Amino acid sequence: MVVNADWGGHSGSRLGLDIGGTLAKLVFFESEIRPSWCNGRFAQVIKSLGVEAVRSEDHRDVQDFVFSRQGSFWGAQDKELAFYDEELQGVFHFLCFQSEKMDRFVSLLAAQDLHHHIDEIYTTGGGAYKYASLFSERLGISLKPVDELGVVVKGISWFLRQPVSDEICWLSEESTQPHFESECRFLQPVNLFPFILVNIGSGVSIVKVDGTDKFERISGSALGGGT
């Protein structure tokens, strides 16, 4: 990807949604160099979710949309997952909330006038179809469905080529230790493929990955982390 602060042309180009049967996950890319079409409002609101009251431009508190871990539909802003990417020159932010509360999320975007800067959002999961009319009628935003496994494979492959923390590694088959404290070896991007990807959501998919565009689902279950 060529680093260009103006790529995308609207806030929706910096967003990604995964609307599953249990949870909806939102990823937002905040560019270090603000695009010419961006006033910074979207980043300001997104980063305030789960932290403190979101104020409208006339300084009134929008208490109904203060998202906290308790007493609210918003799960939390996963600050510990946020990371800076040197190539793209910006920070990735991650948030989640209950899919069944999508109507309230849409109301938040409308109340903060964020939808005026969004044309479309690439979306995975069944919610891309289930909530398409909600986004279109209320916000004028088009949800663009994309293949979930294809996105996950490309995302994991890209992520594993980035500098990783000491928490990401694989357990050696040669280890004689009986516990998970056994020898931990770091993944080598050069020898990334093939690998097995286990995607756990409302259901589980086990995928054999031979390349970013070559993979197949070899097993799975209708039960998963959310059920």
Image (cartoon, helix red, strand yellow):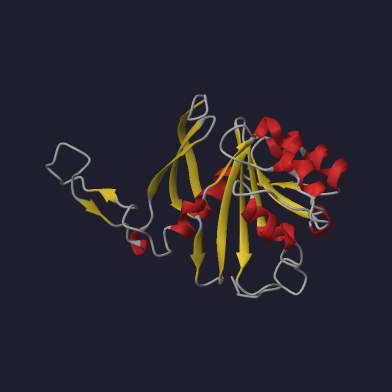
Q: Residue at x 62, y 45 (%)?
A: 147
Give 212 or 17, whichever is nearer the viewer.
17
Query: Could you tell whether 203 is left or right of 48 in the image?
Result: left
Q: State the count of labels.
A: 0
Q: Residue at x 50, y 50 (%)?
A: 153
Give 193 or 22, whichever is nearer the viewer.
22
Quadrant hosting residue 38: bottom right
From the viewer's perspective, is residue 19 above or below residue 225?
below
Instruction: Name the spot of residue 107 as percent of width and height, x first.
Output: 79, 41
For the N terminus, give its image quadrant: bottom right
Give 216 or 91, whichever is nearer the viewer.
91
Instruction: Name the spot of residue 32 as percent of width and height, x first.
Output: 60, 72
Give 106 or 69, whichever is nearer the viewer.
69
Q: Residue at x 15, y 36 (%)?
A: 178
Quadrant hosting residue 175: top left
Query: Could you tell whether 24 is left or right of 140 in the image?
Result: left
Instruction: Name the spot of residue 35 as percent of width and height, x first.
Output: 71, 72
Instruction: Name the spot of residue 43 as percent of width and height, x first.
Output: 67, 60
Query: Could you tell whether 224 is left or right of 141 in the image?
Result: left
